[in-house]
Image: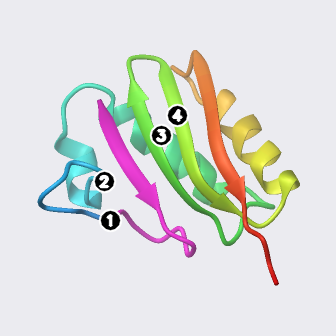
Amino acid sequence: MAICALPASLCGCNNAQSMPVAAPLSAIQSAPAGSGLTAKIKTALMASDGIDNLDIRIRTQQDEVMLSGFADSRAQVDRSIEVVKRVAGVGRVINRIRIRKFT
């Protein structure tokens, strides 16, 4: 299973040393099983229009992808899912992205 976090700026991955929650950018290129797919997904999301200010995590296991985290709108969630589904190698997308509530 490969895991990557996309912070709000979509600039990199987070790493928690004590828990394998997210892989650093350098680990994406060398991590086993699924990391190639994770890198492709991250690249596709960063290159997409209409998906700014996302704070999502990507988990891949074989061809299954789980997206979790936060977006500003339903449109961003829908666009993210659409982009991920178009990545070669993705078979199933599980959406766990929540919409931020602004007060």
Q: Position of residue 98 (x, y in %)?
A: 69, 53
Q: Secondary structure at mark 1?
A: loop
Q: Position of residue 52 (x, y in %)?
A: 71, 69
Name the residue tied to disc 4. 66
Distance (Cα) linking label 4 and label 2: 13 Å
Q: Secondary structure at mark 4?
A: strand
Question: Residue 22: which numbered mark, if any?
Answer: 2
Given the image, on which type of amino acid does mark 2 rest? Ala
Q: Nearer the viewer, residue 24 or 69?
A: 69
Given the image, on which type of amino acid does mark 1 rest? Asn
Instruction: Say whether marks 2 and 1 touch (CB < 8 Å).
Output: yes
The magenta span reads 1-13
Mark 3 and mark 1 lie on one chain; the one further toward the N terminus is: 1
Q: Secondary structure at mark 3?
A: helix
Q: Secondary structure at mark 2?
A: loop
Q: In the image, is 55 to the left or to the right of 35?
A: right
Q: Residue at x 42, y 57 (%)?
A: 5
Q: Nearer the viewer, mark 2 or mark 3?
A: 2
Q: Position of residue 96 (x, y in %)?
A: 62, 41
Instruction: Say whether marks 4 and 3 touch (CB < 8 Å).
Output: no
Q: How many residues crowd around disc 4 within 10 Å: few (fewer than 14), some, or many (20 or more)?
A: some
